[in-house]
Image (cartoon, rainbow, N blue to C red):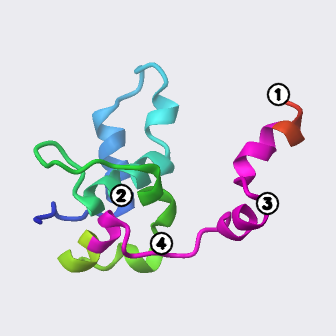
């Protein structure tokens, strides 16, 4: 697998600011740092147009600072395929209760 070159998250955010000028509806959501992180993870996994790779939420929540600086294609391929696992905060809770925390949260907040 070939991968696109990586850009730092700060540089991606600067580019988002240039691409989406003032006056665009909902610009405040498009230029957030988290949007730049999503773009970074998409580049990291190689999920860009022309490849047959798809970005999934697991790629975003499994990304770490330590992993983000590793540009080795084997590590990036392993991360994309899911063989590179990192600790997820909800996993122990999910195994004990049988359901993820995010299913309980709306009930706790009274929004459902």
Depth order, front residue of 82/28: 82
Disc 1/disc 2 C-alpha distance (Å): 32 Å
Relative to 63, say whether 111 is above or below. above
Q: Which mark is residue 64?
A: 4
Task: Compare residues 105 and 96 and report the one nearer the observer.
Answer: 96
Q: Total of numbered circles in the picture?
A: 4
Nearer the viewer's eye, disc 2 or disc 3? Answer: 3
Give the CA distance from mark 2 to mark 4: 10 Å
Q: Reading the chain from its start, which is encountered first: label 1 or label 4?
A: 4
Residue carrying label 3: 97
> Residue 97 at what x, y percent from top left?
79, 60
Labels 4, 3: front one: 3
Which secondary structure, mark 2? helix
**Left or right, 64 with reference to 68:** right
Q: Magenta part of the protein: which range?
A: 78-106
3D distance between C-alphas at marks 1 and 3: 20 Å
Residue of label 1: 112
Say which quarter of the image contains residue 16. Answer: top left
In primary-sequence order, the first of circles 1 and 2 is 2
Q: Out of 44 and 99, give the one closest to the viewer.
A: 99
């Amino acid at each position: 697998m070939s991968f696109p070159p990586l850009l730092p998250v700060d540089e991606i955010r600067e580019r988002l600011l240039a691409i989406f000028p003032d006056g665009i509806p909902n610009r405040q959501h498009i230029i957030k740092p988290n949007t730049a992180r999503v773009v970074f993870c998409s580049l990291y996994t190689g999920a860009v147009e022309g490849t047959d790779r798809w970005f999934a939420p697991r790629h975003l929540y499994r990304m770490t600072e330590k992993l983000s600086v590793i540009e080795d294609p084997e590590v990036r391929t392993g991360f994309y395929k899911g063989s590179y696992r990192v600790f997820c905060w909800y996993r122990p809770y999910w195994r004990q209760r049988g359901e993820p925390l995010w299913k309980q949260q709306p009930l706790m907040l009274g929004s459902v």
